[in-house]
Image (cartoon, rainbow, N blue to C red):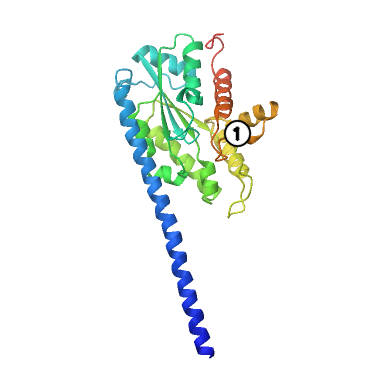
């Protein structure tokens, strides 16, 4: 009788193990396929945007390094005057590729419009959005998305750091910081004439600890300290987003989409104003006219 019970238990365990392998195997391959699709879409979008903007874009070989120490706004002005157009490349996830928001309501479109209206002597200004979706910093490195950005010949690279993706995938903070430095090195190598600006993620509804016992704020604070210690350009979107939200007394549900992560129309306004405030403070007095 005991032998039969053990056999039945063994069969049940084998059955459950098989189900476990099938379920988590499907999850793994589904996520891998999604990541591959994200990279493929970014590459395809680059080709399309380059074709649409080919008359406005300077050749990479024509770019000079004599504006390396200029402010971001001056870089945009000088390049637009010298080559007829300046370009911003956004690498991030705050503007999903399949976003339901109208293009003109996204923060990068609002920024483009405001810069063109208010920055003295700024000529044509275009932008390209590269949505990396759920990719972690490790995957961004592995997929060499800096090479994709290089092909866009940007004046400015706005990089949303993917640190909350690392939080969700239980990436150790030390590895996240090392990856950020490697990504910066890739930008410097592949697009040496572009100015890089790191952006923190916006506030989300996520508050709990991951499997490493770390919260989103842990990744935010450590990465902020790391980047500022390096002396890199950094915009604290999280702080600016929260400051505006709390000042207006809005709940998170009023500034985020249903996924609890992506900003809605109001959330995009918050990001736009945060970026604009940074550029105004970073720029020379008189560059911005009102």
Question: Percent x, y for residue 9?
Answer: 51, 80
How many marks on residues? 1
> Residue tagged by mark 1?
238
User: Who is closer to the viewer here, 240 or 62?
Assistant: 240
Q: What residue is rendered at 70% in x and 29% in y?
A: 249
- Residue in the foreground of this view, choosing between 5 and 206: 5
Whether residue 211 sits left or right of residue 46 in the image: it is right
At x 64% / y 45%, what residue is drawn? 207
Q: Please state if 254 lies on the left or on the right of 101 as rendered.
A: right
Of residues 41 and 2, which is closer to you in this image? 2
Q: Secondary structure at mark 1?
A: helix
Picture coordinates of residue 151 (x, y %)? 33, 30
Specify the quadrant that holds the C terminus. top right
Which quadrant of the structure image shows residue 274? top right
Q: Position of residue 148 (x, y in %)?
A: 35, 35
Query: What residue is shown at x 48% (from left), y 9% (from top)?
Result: 120
151 over 259 or under it: above or below: above
Residue 65, x across and y down, in percent: 38, 22
Instruction: Name the one closer to the observer, 78 or 123.
Output: 123
**Taking 151 as reference, is 100 left or right?**
right
């Amino acid at each position: 009788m005991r032998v039969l019970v053990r056999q039945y238990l063994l069969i049940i365990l084998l059955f459950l193990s098989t189900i476990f392998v099938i379920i988590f195997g499907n999850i793994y391959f589904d996520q891998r396929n999604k990541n591959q699709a994200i990279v493929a879409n970014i590459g395809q979008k680059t080709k399309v945007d380059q074709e649409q903007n080919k008359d406005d874009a300077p050749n990479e070989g024509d770019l000079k390094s004599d504006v390396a120490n200029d402010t971001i706004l001056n870089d945009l002005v000088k390049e637009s005057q010298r080559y007829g157009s300046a370009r911003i490349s956004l690498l991030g996830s705050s503007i999903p590729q399949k976003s339901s928001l109208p293009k003109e309501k996204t923060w990068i479109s609002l920024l483009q419009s405001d810069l063109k209206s208010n920055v003295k002597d700024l000529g044509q200004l275009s932008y390209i959005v590269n949505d990396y979706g759920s990719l972690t910093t490790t995957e961004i490195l592995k997929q060499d998305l800096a090479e994709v950005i290089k092909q866009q010949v940007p004046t400015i690279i706005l990089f949303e750091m993917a640190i909350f993706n690392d939080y969700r995938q239980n990436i150790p903070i030390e590895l996240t910081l090392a990856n950020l430095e490697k990504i910066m090195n890739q930008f410097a190598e592949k697009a040496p004439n572009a100015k890089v600006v790191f952006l923190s993620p916006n506030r989300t509804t996520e508050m709990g600890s991951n499997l490493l016992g770390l919260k989103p704020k842990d990744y935010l604070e450590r990465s902020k300290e790391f980047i500022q210690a390096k002396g890199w350009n950094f915009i604290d979107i999280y702080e600016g987003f929260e400051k505006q939200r709390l000042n207006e007394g809005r709940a998170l549900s009023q500034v985020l989409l249903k996924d609890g992560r992506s900003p809605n129309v109001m959330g995009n306004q918050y990001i736009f104003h945060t970026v604009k405030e940074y550029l105004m403070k970073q720029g020379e007095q008189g560059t911005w006219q009102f």
